[in-house]
Image (tube, rainbow, N blue to C red):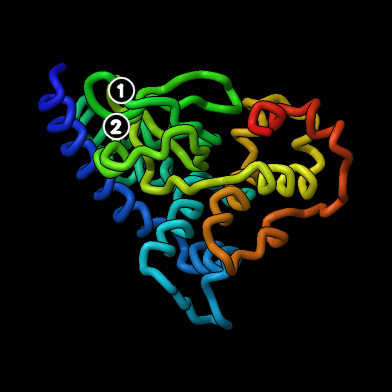
Amino acid sequence: MTRDEILTRYRRLREVSKQHHAAVLDVIAPHVVMDYAKRLGLTQGKVVVLDRTEDMTLAFDLAIYLAKPGRSHPLDRYAEAAQFLPGSDEATVLEAMRHAHFSIWRVERLHETAGLVLRDLLRQEEIWLVDESMEKNPPLGGALAGRLFTPESFAMTTGVLVPVTRSLMKEVSDKIPALQHATATAIARDPRFAPPSIGSVLPGARRDRFVTNTHRCSGSGLRSSGLAHVM
């Protein structure tokens, strides 16, 4: 595809994904979103308080892409209720969203046609990302946490990519000892890993609320885990 064809297709799929992200919230209980907002430091009592309206997108992302224990996945419930026509853009994008994967991504370079090339630092794989906003000011060499899904030959973000640091990854590993000995793929799929990583962008976020064990570990444990690729 030419650059114009790629961007035209991207814009169509991005619009469909926005519609899905808005509609799926109807199958998620409000208290679930509020719980994530609280963990991200976006509430005072029972009231959501935002410095920026886009901060709430972080809570929505976690509520949409993380299933609560004992509950079916929100996107599965939404897909079952929506029953989009197989092969339609709506069905294609939703299926890709259901297989979105979280990781830490390093921005390697601009793609030769459109978008950027990112490296998955947990799986050590490259992926082609199309994102018009990021392409205009690419954070080359920077590390970002977030989910990508692949509805085409290129990937797209779920709407949230936040910068992360080496010190944050050390903190996450220290607070979630089980991650120290897990494989890179297991870490990327662990629902405890995404919230503190995404929450790092918010100064008021209480990352300790995302973990169940705050045992401190040695650096050697960290180096033996899949997080060593990030460190």
- Report the amino acid beneath label 1: His
> What x and y, as percent, mark residue 209?
69, 62
The secondary element bearing badge 1 is classed as loop
Residue 139: name its quadrant: top left
Q: Are marks 1 and 2 in contact (CB under 8 Å)?
A: yes
Distance from disc 1 to disc 2, alpha carbons, whole Å, reads 9 Å
Residue at 34% from the left image edge and 28% from the top image edge: 116
Residue 90: name its quadrant: top left
189 on left or right of 145 = right
Q: Tell me the residue that label 2 is attached to.
A: 130
Residue at 35% from the left image edge and 59% from the top image edge: 26
Q: Tell me the residue that label 1 is attached to.
A: 111
Sequence-first disc among 1 and 2? 1
54 on left or right of 30 = left
> What x and y, as percent, mark residue 104?
55, 36
The secondary element bearing badge 2 is classed as loop
Position of residue 124 relative to residue 16, above or below, is: above
- Report the amino acid beneath label 2: Val
Of circles 1 and 2, the one toward us is 1
The one nearer the camera, 138 or 153, is: 138
**Quadrant where the N terminus is found in the figure:** top left
The one nearer the camera, 118 or 186, is: 118
Position of residue 58 relative to residue 80, above or below, is: below
> What x and y, as percent, mark residue 157?
37, 39
Residue at 49% from the left image edge and 81% from the top image edge: 47
